[in-house]
Every structure is written in C-alpha cells, then in structure tokens.
Image (cartoon, rainbow, N blue to C red):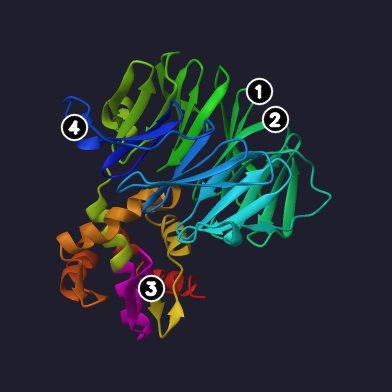
Amino acid sequence: MLCDEKRVYVHTDYRVEAYDKESLVKGEEVRLLWKSGKLTEDLSKLVNSKDYIYGIGKNLFVRVSKIDASTETLTISDDLVDLSCTYREIYLLGKTGLFRIPVEKFSPAEIKRITVSELMEKPFRCLCVSDDYVYVASESYLYKLERNGGKVGEKALAGVRILVMSEEGPVAVRDDGKVLNMSEDMEVTSAGEFDGKPIKAEYNVYHTFLLTVTGLHIFGKAGGRIAHISDSSYLSFSEGLNHLYLYKKEGLQVASKADILGDNYQKIDLTTLSAIVFASLMLFEREKGSKVSIKEKRGLLDVRSDERNIQMEKLVFRLSKYFPEIFVLFSNPGYYESLLEYGKRFELIKGEGDRITLNTDMLDHILKKHSTFKTFQEDIPSLVSSCIS
C-alpha cells in the first residue's frame, strides 16, 4: 500500500489499484480511479516515484503509470526481497545481489548489478538508502555501502526484518520485537519494543510507524512507543502527510494523525514543503552569487548552479536535518509530483518557457516569516553547496 498527494494505491489480487484520496479523507464513497492489468506474480512491496509505482515479486520488477495504469515488467535474475526509490534511481535487493536502475529508463539494459564484497553474508534480507549510502541487512549483519557498492562499515546485528531510513540514520525492525533508531554510523541511539510479527514500517517526522499482526505501533525518536492502534485485521498501511491509510479485507480506512498522536502531531502541508526547497535555493543564489537554473527534464527537476548539478535527493535529505517536515519528499518521492504544482499555485516559482525561475519577492517574504530560516540562514547556502556534483 502507498499514497501520494492525490491517490492511495493498493496491491491486491495480482493488480495495483488507485483510489481517490480526497473522497477517502472526506468520508465519501471510496472512488476507484484505475486498476492495472493482472500481473503474473503477486507483489511483495510497492514504492512510489514522481510518475510511477514500482513493485517486486519473486523475480518480477513492475512499473505502473500513475496516469493510465499502463504496466511494464522486467525479469530479474535473483530472488528479490526488497526495493527502495530515490528521486532518480531505484535500488533492488536480491537474496544474493544489489541492483540499480534510473527511474526514467525502464529497460533490461539499464539494470546495473552493483558489485559488493564477496565476504558479505548472504542471503540479504532488506535495505534502505540515504543521500550517500545504502544499508543492507543479512541474517546476522548490517552493512553500510557506498552507492557504488563499496563497503564502508558493518555491524553484527541479528534478525533485522525491515529497514527504513530516517534523517539521522537507519531504523532497524527486528524479529525479536525491537525497533532500533541508529546513527549514520550504525550506532544504536534509542530502542523500542513491540509485539507480533512485523509486516511493514515507514518513517517520517520523528516517528516510526510499524504494522504487525497485532496492530499499528508508533514510536518516537526516544525509542518508546507513543501510540498504538490494536487491530489484528490490518493487512497494510501507508503514512500520508496528515493521515494514515489502512487496508483490511473489507476495504480502505483513514485515520487522522492529530487524533492518534495528540501533542506529538505536527501538521504538514505541501505549500510549506515547496517553500522550504525553493527558498533554500534562493538563499544559496543570493549568498553565493551563483544563478540557479531549473528545468523539467524527463519529468524530473534538473536544478543547476553555473551548469553544475544540484542533486535534489541530497538537498532534501540534508535540509530535513533543519526542517524535519520535508523528509517526506525523501521517504516518499511520490510527493514530488505536487512540488512544482504547489510552487506555481502559490507563486513561489514562475514558468518562463521550459525554464523555471524563483519568485524572489514571495520567497523573500517566507524567509522573513519562517523562524528556522532566520536561525540557520548562514548554514543553508553551504548546505546547498554540498549537494553540487
């Protein structure tokens, strides 16, 4: 199960289905938007990109268009166990190998097997991806790899069933009922406990959401469980900006984060997320005297400074250390679909032909009003500079 700003996606009965999110939130009759063709394998996991849904079966890699449900499939020469989507790339984990493919190029020739150390324990079980690293768990070890596969660290850690990424480091969900918050260097910073076999986990804005066979558990950064929905009939869930979407055999349900989290709830809106990204680029442009150029290229934002590429996924990941609410763009790239839309709607950016320019008047107003920008005004230009390749 997945969601973005407009839709909730469910994989059931060998198909991917998309439902209208607004009608679901309003409590109206659930409206089916589209249904993919029947797949040859049941899918074990879905991930979201700006324009597509990706999924894996045992040896099947699937891409489904968000627009018309058109479906493409590839066969992978390994038993697939996990996948992760960044702004530009998909990482696929097999029991014995790690693969990478660009999101805009879905073809067998584009799938690259990443060379990893033969000394790493196999079979692999799960992975998560940060701005610079890939974390891979086997039965007894957690490994930290560079994006090109070079091993930079390992930790003896048994029974990791699920890995998700936070802005600080990986979060490991173990078979023994432990949730471990970890640093980038795989040091445990806090821990929590749960009951029941783990099914699915997501992370966003200081919280780890974990579905087990006993219900939905929510953990804070300090490790302890801060909320719980006890219901053994949930099959999957997806965490949106301000709601949780839950799936049972009987159908879809929605729950308000404000009702569940109470004082721990932090409202998020896409206007603010867009403003943080574009205002950070404007601050960089002003302080460094380097013009930012933005174009849409193959459906993605091509952001440049003096013809050098500013990596969007790295920018979002690093900004989230100052603005935790924008981590959702990293953990769920499906929300990038609305980044430009909200930027234009609220005049944060302006379109000029195929180019996009920053609306300095509107962004100036945001910089003056947003207290975090005032606090970190000197740090943000250097942060943007660190994302240039």
Mark 4: give few (<14), some (14-19) or many (20+) Cα within 10 Å. Answer: some
Q: List the residue tagged with mark 2.
A: 159
**Residues at marks 1 and 2, CA–CA distance in whole angstroms:** 7 Å
Residues shaded magenta: 279-302
Q: Nearer the viewer, residue 188 or 338?
A: 338
Q: Are marks 1 and 4 in contact (CB under 8 Å)?
A: no
Label disc, if present, on residue 303 of the rendered structure:
3
Label 4 or label 2, whichever comes before in sequence order: 4
Q: Which residue is drawn at the image coordinates 42% and 69% (left, top)? A: 379
Label 3 or label 4, whichever comes before in sequence order: 4
Label disc, if present, on residue 176 of the rendered structure:
1
Q: Which residue is drawn at the image coordinates 50% and 33% (left, top)? A: 201
Q: Which numbered mark, 1 or 4, is in the foreground of this view?
A: 4
Disc 4 marks a residue whose amino acid type is: Ser
Disc 2 marks a residue whose amino acid type is: Gly
Q: List the residue tagged with mark 4.
A: 23
Disc 3 marks a residue whose amino acid type is: Val
Q: Are marks 1 and 2 in contact (CB under 8 Å)?
A: yes
Q: Quadrant of the N terminus?
A: top left
